[in-house]
């Protein structure tokens, strides 16, 4: 168990470019989440997968954002035509919800800077 | 609209004393609450949780108290240690939902 792995750790891109981030969850976790955190704020929910099915999407996830989890293992988050307002830390988390005493395991995040 | 609020952006405490971090929420339908701890350049780490059917949960030096009538929860750390210096987030969830709603965080500094 190596925890939740996110790549890359940092990404600087020019406005209008597309970017893709990858998340590898803990192997036995069937639930995967994407959150976004901007400076001075707590993490904000973006989307949730149970196995390969995307079951919930936030209104924050505009049509420029798309997430996939094709085989129920790793996930990708793509942002098309990036804007400066997309600059944030993108956090991935996974869980295997058993009972009520659960919490996510977060990765270290991908910090996106749009210039 | 911020459903989970942490009104103290920062807190400083002497080593060995008690740290009390506070959190308020507005949605009475929240039924599960957690505290996360975050060091710089790392993702948040799950610390302790409490269900709405309880008013207290304890794990070593960490105790979470829930006051449903006041829609308030607090995290007590006793005794505080320098390694506890981090940003602490409270979070809440609905029984029917899959997401957590996070507060804006409180930065705790424990002074040796």
Image (spheres, rainbow, N blue to C red):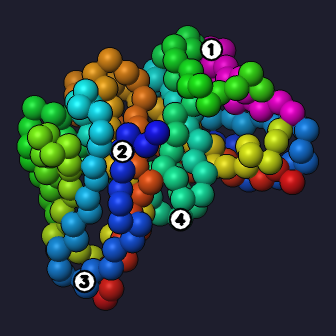
Range drawn in magenta: A65-81
Q: Which chain carries label 4?
A: B
- Does residue B9 show up magenta in the picture? no
Q: Do the residues labelled 1 and 3 touch (CB within 8 Å)?
A: no
What residue does disc 3 label?
A: B15
Return the disc, 3 or 2, that comes first in the chain's sequence. Answer: 2
Residue at the (22%, 58%) spot, across then down: B75
Report crowding for label 3: few under 14, some 14 to 19, many 20 or more residues within 10 A (C-alpha).
some
Quarter of the image with the C terminus of chain B in it: bottom left
Q: Check the residue under mark 3 and report the chain it is in.
A: B
Q: Is mark 2 on a helix, strand or loop?
A: strand
| Cα–Cα gap, marks 1 and 3 | 48 Å
Marks 2, 4: nearer the viewer = 2
Mark 4 or 1, closer to the camera: 4
Pointers 2 and 4 in contact (C-beta within 8 Å): no
Residue at (77% x, 26% y) in the render: A64
> How far apart are labels 1 and 2 at the CA level?
34 Å
Q: Where is residue B52 in the image (x, y as percent from the top left)?
A: 15, 34
Q: Which of marks 1 and 3 is in front?
A: 3
- Badge 2 local density, few (<14 within 10 Å), some, or many (20+)? many
Q: Which residue, given by chain and number where applicable, does mark 1 sit on?
A: A71
Q: Is mark 1 on a helix, strand or loop?
A: loop
| In contact (CB < 8 Å): disc 3 and disc 2 | no
- In the foreground, A31 or B4: B4
Q: Which residue is drawn at 32% across and 17% down?
A: B96
| Earlier-in-chain disc, 2 versus 4 | 2
Q: What element carries label 4?
A: loop
**Chain letter for the residue marked with disc 2 in the picture:** B
- Circle 2 is placed at which residue position? B4
Give the left or right position of residue B24, taking residue B54 as reference. Answer: right
Alpha carbon separation for disc pair 3 and 2:
28 Å
Q: Name the residue that disc number 4 marks.
A: B40
């Amino acid at each position: 168990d190596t925890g939740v792995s996110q790549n890359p750790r940092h990404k600087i891109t020019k406005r209008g470019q597309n970017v893709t981030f990858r998340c590898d969850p803990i192997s036995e976790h069937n639930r995967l989440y994407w959150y976004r955190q901007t400076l001075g704020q707590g993490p904000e929910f973006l989307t949730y997968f149970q196995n390969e099915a995307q079951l919930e999407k936030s209104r924050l996830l505009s049509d420029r954002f798309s997430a996939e989890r094709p085989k129920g293992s790793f996930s990708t988050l793509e942002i098309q035509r990036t804007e400066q307002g997309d600059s944030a830390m993108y956090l991935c988390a996974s869980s295997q919800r058993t009972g009520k005493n659960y919490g996510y395991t977060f990765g270290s995040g991908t910090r996106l800077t749009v210039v | 609209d911020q459903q989970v609020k942490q009104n103290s952006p920062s807190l400083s405490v002497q080593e060995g004393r008690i740290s009390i971090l506070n959190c308020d929420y507005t949605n009475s339908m929240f039924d599960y609450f957690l505290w996360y701890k975050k060091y710089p350049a790392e993702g948040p780490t799950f610390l302790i949780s409490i269900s709405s059917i309880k008013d207290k949960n304890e794990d070593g030096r960490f105790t979470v108290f829930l006051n449903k009538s006041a829609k308030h929860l607090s995290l007590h750390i006793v005794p505080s240690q320098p390694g506890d210096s981090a940003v602490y987030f409270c979070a809440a969830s609905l029984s029917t939902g899959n997401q957590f709603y996070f507060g804006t965080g409180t930065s705790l500094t424990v002074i040796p």
